[in-house]
Image (tube, rainbow, N blue to C red):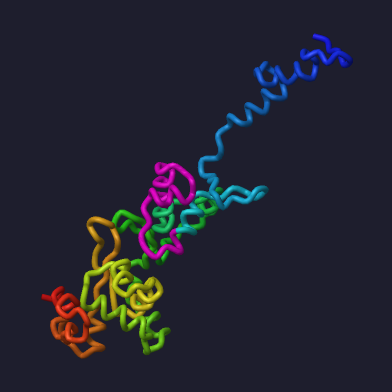
Amino acid sequence: MTSDPETGDPETGVQDAGVHQISGEPQAPHAAEAADVATPPAELSVATPLDVPGQPRLDLDRALEAILFIADEPLGVVTLAAAVARPVAEVKAAIGRLVADYDGTGTSGEPRTDEAAAEHGVARVRRGFELREVGGGWRFYVRGEYDALVSGFVLNQTSTRLSQAALETLAVIAYKQPISRSQVASIRAVNVDSVVRTLLGRGLITEVDTDSETGAIRYGTTDLLLTNLGLNSLDELPHISPLLDDGQEGFDLDRA
């Protein structure tokens, strides 16, 4: 086909090339590009909203590890999948690899650097923490055999004086336990995340169970609180209703 530069014939060579590109007629360079596009990405590569153009893609296992590291409460696989923009099935598989990695029975990550080390006689290590499923979600926990050690360290590193916010939060938990963090926040009308972490670190409260409907962790007081208050049981806590504006609609009924 020929072109006529003076008459502007619509069937010009330039336009004809465009038609060929649109119609998808075989061209060697484009066929090579199509082959590249059809090649699936590496199994463990992850494209997330945090990817920076020109930077390497994030490793799926390490991306989940980073998110779980800063989590205050267990995270479900659906939440994690949404965070890393990958299918739930891939996230479940990655969590399985992480669990095995921390337990010293498997490997995780891309490339498998720990697997290469194992081939050279380097033994896998069982970590002092574990990735545990609790209440339908996943979260890092200290292994049971190190609980006493870590608790003692935290208690020795903290001051003995609690802030007013911590005292108020502790009172709510003591009278309303078991109670979730969001319920405490609703009663106090402020965010209590950092305060709850402080009370947990002091060993004054502990995770009791999870809410059957929401999956939220519920907290209760420990024997250490009773010891510090000089009480034998929670029943010896003073009645608080006379101090509340709403009287019997306050806390004491929950202790009955």
Tell whether position 123 is magenta: no
Name the residue: 65% across, 48% down: 53
Q: Main secondary structure of the magenta part?
A: helix
- Image: 24 above or below 197: above
- Image: 23 above or below 57: above
Name the residue: 22% across, 82% down: 245
Tell whether position 81 is magenta: yes
Q: Quadrant of residue 137?
A: bottom left
- Furthest residue toward right: 6
Residue 63, given in percent of the width and then of the height, sits at 50, 54
The magenta stretch is 68-97
Residue 112, given in percent of the width and then of the height, sits at 53, 49
Residue 210, given in percent of the width and then of the height, sits at 25, 61
Residue 108 seen = no
Residue 210 seen = yes
Name the residue: 63% across, 51% down: 52
Residue 114, given in percent of the width and then of the height, sits at 52, 54
